[in-house]
Amino acid sequence: MRDSRQTILVTGAGSGFGEALVKRFARAGFAVGVTDIDAGRAESVLKEIVQQGGSGFAAAMDVTSQSAWEGVYQQVIDHWGGLDVLVNNAGVAAAGRLEDTPLEHWQWVLDTDLVSVIRGCHRFIPLLRQQGRGHIVNVASFAGMTPVPEVSAYATAKAGVVALSEQLRVDLAGSGVGVTLVCPAYVQTRLLETFRSNDERHRKMAERWMAKSNVTAEAVAEQIFKAVRKRRFLVLTHSETRWLWRFRRWFPERYFRMMIKVSDKLKSRRRA
């Protein structure tokens, strides 16, 4: 039988955006599915939620594994009988130009950041369609909406998530299933723990940009929560990216020249 509570399943929920999301939705009364590749982190987050009066389950999950998706799907059915919100949040990052990024890094990023989103949607959409209601949240990146120097693999994967989400929005129209695409810029999370690059300067640069960000994971979670409630499609989490997104659409050549200047700065630092 279908559980009467609203329910949410979040991948990569052991830290960062995912942790903030399950806590925000739990405060709103949702039962939460806390999944993470690190079982200890998932259990720790769920324990905090339960201590605050929430409920749900925790599961170790490698989003690149189809069998893991099947297992979590079965847990959703066993615990709740259905699902209201699926959040494809788990992700990794790598930096470098296309030719400087090893193919194994490309495969790793594409499998984790893009194919895992496809797997999640592919597994759960039939259930959501059958219910006649639900919501899918796909976490991409602003790097997936606009060219950014020297993040070829990451930007390509996230651009795929953008395209997939736009396609889902069309395909699911009229089904009762909503779609939200989230494109954050830099936020201080644990993303750099698994970061890959053959140039240490990339890590240092990412650390600096994260440190400068005044947008928190909790603020992003709040924006996503409101977008799901209002069934809003696009969430640009940073005010500066909302401006840049419009600037690129209105003045594509000027935006391209601006990115070339950024690229030239990176090249000069690499030669230094």
Image (cartoon, rainbow, N blue to C red):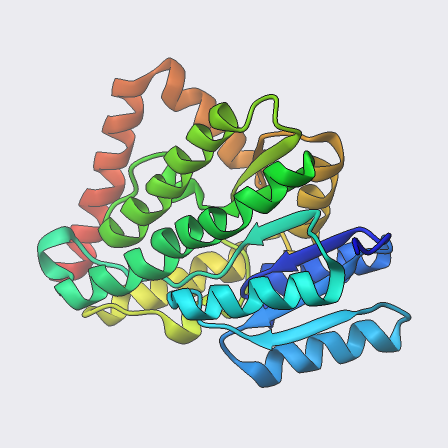
Residue lying furthest right = 53
The residue lying at 77 percent from left, 55 percent from top is: 25
Closest to the observer: 75 or 178?
A: 75
110 sits to left or right of 51: left
Q: Quadrant of residue 19?
A: bottom right
Residue lying furthest front = 1
Q: In the rendering, at what x and y percent does residue 96 appear?
A: 20, 58
- Judge whether residue 133 can be spotted in this image: yes
Q: In the rendering, at what x and y percent does residue 120 appear?
A: 48, 53
Residue lying furthest bottom = 40
The residue lying at 40 percent from left, 42 percent from top is: 161
Residue lying furthest left = 99
Q: Is residue 33 above or below residue 247?
A: below
78 sits to left or right of 69: right
Q: Quadrant of the C terminus?
A: bottom left
The residue lying at 39 percent from left, 61 percent from top is: 206
Q: In the rendering, at what x and y percent does residue 39 appear?
A: 57, 82
Q: In the rendering, at what x and y percent does residue 124 appear?
A: 54, 49
Q: Is residue 258 above or below residue 254?
A: below
- Judge whether residue 16 can be spotted in this image: no
